[in-house]
Image (cartoon, helix red, strand yellow):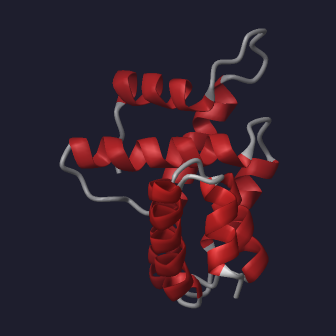
Amino acid sequence: MPNIEELAEQLADGEKGQYMAWLEALSEGAFLQGEAHLGERAFRISAESCATPKQFSLLVEAFDEHAKEHPYAPNGFNLLADHVDDSPDPLSDWIVAVEYFYDWLAQKGRTSPGLAQILEYISCCVESQKGLPHKESLVNVLTDMLDRYGYEG
């Protein structure tokens, strides 16, 4: 398990309030790490790719839920990494998009269809940008797609 205190200090970048928020999120993440089948390297990469403790908590909870729903499938981090590998967008942009999708579902009073389905939808957003001369940010494309077409699932 990574040194939670050191990682929280690194991610807080000297802000005491952020340190406490990161420490709490990382501690909760460490508790779920085994159930989510999240290795130490994946845990660290996930944390370092998140802009906020809230994003990290949401991501680890999504990984945990995915592991419960699909115990014999690749873990949530590997699933996310596979989608990122097939995309020009970095992991941090995918995490922002995943967070937005979960927030959108909550605003609509809908339950999560699961991480795999969310990642598939976001992949469609990535595909819609292929061949365009100017690419928008992934979260902007996702926002536009959800506003135009919604989500049936």
| Rendered residue at 37%/21% (across/down) | 148
Residue 51 visible in the shown view: yes
- Front-most of residues 10 and 128: 10
Quadrant where the N terminus lies? bottom right
| Rendered residue at 43%/41% (across/down) | 100
Is 1 left or right of 12, judged from the image as shown? right
Instruction: Tell me if residue 146 comes above or below residue 4 in the rendering.
Output: above
Residue 74 visible in the shown view: no
- Front-most of residues 34 and 8: 8
Q: Position of residue 33 (x, y in %)?
A: 58, 84
Q: Quadrant of residue 48?
A: bottom right
Q: Position of residue 113 (x, y in %)?
A: 38, 59
Give the residue furthest to the left: 109
- Front-most of residues 10 and 118: 10
Is 42 left or right of 98, judged from the image as shown? right
| Rendered residue at 45%/79% (across/down) | 69
| Rendered residue at 64%/19% (across/down) | 136
Q: Position of residue 20 (x, y in %)?
A: 47, 66
